[in-house]
Image: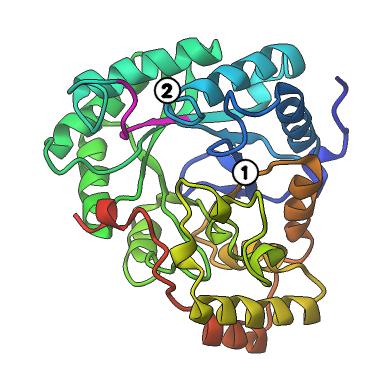
């Protein structure tokens, strides 16, 4: 594979907090569509195209699939077959925190689980190290010093270059940063859910990240597909809302759909798709380093990445967005960030 020589010119790159690490404005998340239930050829085509478009960051977790671990296994295969020799041009991340294997040592934030999980992730991907290793969620039963100490150990062992946290509250983020700072391993980045319909990070967390010099990479910026044209006329067959899993039809209230339709009309007037406007909107704040997209096809990926062609908003556009971009009760990860 010969990648596009212009790939780095088209994609904006942003510094993660006060670190030296630049991330693409749009990163590719492998939460959905990269498990053992999807054709490997489709996954290969999406990842190759992402690299061609200047996406250097690929975000995984131990239990992405299904089945658990299969997204990392598939990514490892694609890394070996399609991106051989490109490791130093890539930022690869993984996480530990949710259930991964049976029993008391396969979940949450103990030192035993976190470090064992990282070793398993490295084996699945065929890597010596990941660039970023995250605590996937706050564990209320484990001392934060223990979980952060495990992240620090991962760096000292050479198995991670940087560390991050995901879905931690503003208070816990401050505490985590202080603990890691004392250990000499800076907290590089926080990964919260964030979208026009889920704005929980705005009152406090973004201020903490700005003050502490921590980067921010947001996930579910399209509200699991709500902020696309997919649900404007009901629930289509084969969509995420039509299947059991992380997205419930209960989220598709008429009140929420009215917001989505109004935002879609504004996007059309701006010459964008709703998805492109929603992605660009998450990047309007300089404290946000990158926004994570998923993709089930190359065409979907290309449409989403085109959001970087128009990242600016007028004051009037932002005011109109604010009238409709209000909480829709879709933050599935709220429990972790309320601790």
Image quarter for residue 117? Answer: top left
Disc assigned to residue 27: 1
Q: Residue at x 35, y 53 (%)?
A: 333
Task: Return the x and y of residue 150 as percentages of the image width and height.
Answer: 25, 25
Q: Residues within 10 Å of mark 1 (few under 14, many from 20)?
A: many
Q: How is the image coloured?
A: rainbow
Image quarter for residue 309? Answer: bottom right
> From the viewer's perspective, is residue 28 above or below residue 267?
above
Image quarter for residue 233? Answer: bottom right
Task: Return the x and y of residue 88 as percentages of the image width and height.
Answer: 64, 21
Given residues 116 and 20, the one toward you in this image is 116
At mark 2, the secondary structure is strand
What is the magenta segment's predominant secondary structure? loop
> From the viewer's perspective, is residue 82 above or below residue 326?
above
The answer to if 191 sits in the magenta stretch is no
Position of residue 161 in the picture relative to residue 46 (left or right): left
Disc assigned to residue 277: none
Viewport quadrant of the C terminus: bottom left
Q: Residues within 10 Å of mark 2 (few under 14, many from 20)?
A: many
Q: Residue at x 54, y 66 (%)?
A: 285
* Foreground: disc 2 or disc 1: 1
Magenta residues (range): 94-101
> From the viewer's perspective, is residue 246 above or below residue 266?
above
Position of residue 103 in the picture relative to residue 44 (left or right): left
> From the viewer's perspective, is residue 210 above or below residue 93?
below
Q: Earlier in the sequence, mark 2 or mark 1?
A: 1
Q: Residue at x 70, y 72 (%)?
A: 312
Q: Which residue is mark 2?
A: 160
Viewport quadrant of the N terminus: top right
């Amino acid at each position: 594979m010969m990648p596009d020589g212009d790939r780095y010119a088209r994609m904006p790159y942003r510094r993660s907090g006060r670190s030296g690490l630049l991330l693409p404005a749009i990163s590719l998340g492998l939460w959905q569509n990269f498990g053992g239930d999807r054709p490997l050829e489709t996954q290969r085509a999406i990842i190759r195209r992402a690299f061609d478009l200047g996406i250097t960051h690929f975000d995984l977790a131990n239990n992405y699939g299904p089945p658990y671990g299969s997204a990392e296994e598939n990514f490892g295969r694609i890394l070996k077959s399609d991106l051989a020799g490109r490791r130093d041009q890539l930022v690869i991340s993984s996480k530990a925190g949710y259930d991964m294997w049976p029993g008391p040592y396969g979940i949450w934030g103990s030192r035993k689980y976190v470090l064992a999980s990282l070793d398993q992730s490295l084996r699945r991907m065929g890597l010596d190290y990941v660039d970023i290793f995250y605590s996937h969620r706050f564990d209320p039963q484990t001392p934060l010093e223990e979980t952060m100490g495990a992240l620090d150990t991962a760096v000292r062992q050479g198995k991670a270059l940087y560390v991050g946290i995901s879905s931690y509250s503003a208070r816990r983020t401050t505490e985590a940063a202080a603990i890691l700072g004392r250990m000499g391993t800076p907290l590089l980045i926080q990964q919260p859910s964030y979208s026009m319909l889920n704005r929980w990070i705005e009152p406090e967390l973004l201020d903490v990240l700005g003050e502490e010099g921590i980067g921010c990479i947001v996930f579910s910026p399209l509200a699991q597909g709500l902020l696309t044209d997919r649900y404007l006329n009901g629930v289509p067959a084969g969509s995420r809302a039509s299947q059991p899993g992380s997205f419930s039809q209960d989220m598709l209230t008429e009140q929420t759909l009215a917001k989505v339709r109004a935002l879609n009309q504004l996007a059309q007037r701006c010459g964008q798709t709703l998805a492109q406007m929603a992605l660009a909107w998450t990047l309007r704040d300089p404290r946000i380093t990158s926004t994570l997209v998923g993709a089930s096809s190359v065409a979907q990926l290309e449409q989403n990445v085109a959001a970087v062609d128009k990242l600016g908003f007028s004051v009037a556009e932002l005011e109109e967005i604010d009238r409709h971009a209000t909480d829709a009760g879709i933050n599935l990860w709220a429990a972790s960030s309320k601790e």
